[in-house]
């Protein structure tokens, strides 16, 4: 009789233990949610995360805190989320760097395919080719001619090794035959002052990050990496029109969590993203930065994310870059 009672008690405890994670998922959230941004403040990923956080907080019924954690081409923040509990309280607003880094950085401590749960794509982030205002060029072809006539004088800045800016510039150099020197930065907030001062001469960077200096006239845009011209700068040719088609290495912004996120948690977070992107003011501000809204379901984003890992690996191989 005593054995039977103990047996039943043990079974009940096991059943309750199995139900506990499910119950916690149904109750989510019961505390603030953190969204890590792998780059410094002021870039496209940071801007989008902050624009969405207020409406997401309202939808979830808890505060949503955006925390910048830059460094190692994004790997510091990516790894922190990869190692976080799969409970939905630590998320990452990621960019294409999450799909790229494993192919370029040997020390990358996570597997992008296995260690993350896709929640939703937010937007595509096209690049724009910009130059210092004092560089005597007004078109891409003039830039190529200048680079060939003055070899060794062009330095370009990127937001770090292995970023879309790095890859676009590498392919530009290979295709045009213009030697350009890479100067990697930890983020756009460090890159911009050097671009404005002329310490570096050009950058393939995202429109949102370059917009304020473009408006101020401190830098000049030569082309934009979109399929069609951007309404915000309709006079600016596309890369294809400027003669450098194939360099449209658009980054993207999407929300992911650690592996093992329960389906109810993913669903709540996905719905919170939908609420945020239904806000007309938020949508307008995201699009005003030259970004293209591409909201998607978790499953569609997951498929896109895995395709990105494969396509970037091929692009890196084509550029002759190797993991270091």
Image (spheres, rainbow, N blue to C red):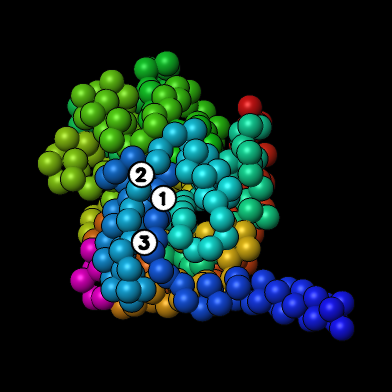
Q: CA distance from mark 2 to mark 3?
A: 16 Å
Quadrant position of residue 85? bottom right
Mark 2 and mark 3 lie on one chain; the one further toward the N terminus is 3
Give the SS element for disc 3: loop
Q: Main secondary structure of the magenta part?
A: helix
Which of discs 3 and 1 lies nearer the camera? The answer is 3
The answer to whether residue 300 of the structure is visible from this angle is: no
Q: Nearer the viewer, residue 305 or 217?
A: 305
For the residue carrying disc 2, how many other residues have a C-alpha within 10 Å: few (<14), some (14-19), or many (20+)? some
Numbered tag placed on residue 68 in the rendering: 2
Q: Is residue 291 above or below residue 57?
A: above
Expressed as whole percent of the image width and height from the top left, the position of residue 119 reads: 51, 67
Which residue was labeled with disc 1?
36
Mark 1 and mark 2 lie on one chain; the one further toward the N terminus is 1
Residue found 32% across the figure and 24% down from its top: 200
Q: Which residues are magenta?
A: 279-287
Q: Is residue 218 above or below residue 313?
A: above
Residues at marks 1 and 2 touching, judged by CB atoms closer than 8 Å = yes
Q: Nearer the viewer, residue 6 or 200?
A: 6
For the residue carrying disc 1, how many other residues have a C-alpha within 10 Å: few (<14), some (14-19), or many (20+)? many
Which residue was labeled with disc 3?
32
Expressed as whole percent of the image width and height from the top left, the position of residue 38 reads: 43, 44
Expressed as whole percent of the image width and height from the top left, the position of residue 318 reads: 65, 40
Q: Is residue 21 above or below residue 86?
A: below
Q: Nearer the viewer, residue 91 or 175?
A: 91
Q: Nearer the viewer, residue 226 or 209?
A: 209
């Amino acid at each position: 009789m005593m054995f039977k009672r103990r047996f039943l008690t043990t079974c009940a405890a096991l059943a309750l233990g199995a139900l506990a994670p499910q119950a916690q998922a149904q109750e989510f959230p019961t505390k603030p949610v953190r969204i890590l941004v792998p780059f410094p403040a002021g870039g496209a990923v940071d801007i989008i995360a902050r624009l969405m956080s207020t409406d997401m907080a309202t939808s979830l019924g808890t505060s949503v805190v955006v925390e910048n954690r830059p460094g190692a081409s994004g790997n510091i923040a990516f790894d922190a989320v990869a190692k976080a509990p799969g409970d939905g309280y630590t998320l990452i607003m990621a960019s294409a760097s999450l799909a790229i880094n494993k192919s370029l950085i040997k020390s990358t401590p996570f597997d992008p395919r296995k260690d993350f749960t896709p929640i939703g794509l937010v937007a595509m982030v096209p690049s724009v080719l910009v130059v210092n205002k004092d560089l005597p060029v007004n078109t891409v072809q003039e830039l190529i001619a200048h680079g060939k006539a003055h070899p060794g004088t062009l330095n370009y800045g990127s937001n770090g090794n292995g970023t879309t800016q790095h890859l676009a510039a590498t392919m530009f150099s290979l295709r045009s035959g213009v030697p350009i020197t890479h100067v990697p930065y930890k983020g756009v907030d460090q890159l911009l002052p050097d671009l404005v001062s002329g310490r570096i001469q050009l950058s393939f960077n995202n429109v949102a990050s370059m917009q304020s200096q473009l408006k101020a006239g401190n830098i000049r845009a030569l082309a934009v990496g979109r399929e069609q011209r951007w309404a915000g700068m309709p006079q600016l040719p596309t890369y294809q029109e400027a003669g450098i088609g194939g360099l449209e290495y658009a980054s993207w912004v999407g929300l992911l969590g650690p592996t093992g996120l329960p389906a109810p948690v993913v669903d709540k977070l996905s719905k919170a993203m939908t609420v945020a992107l239904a806000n007309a003011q938020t949508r307008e501000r995201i699009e005003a930065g030259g970004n293209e809204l591409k909201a998607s379901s978790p499953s569609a984003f997951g498929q896109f994310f895995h395709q990105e890992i494969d396509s970037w690996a091929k692009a890196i191989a084509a550029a002759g870059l190797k993991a270091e």
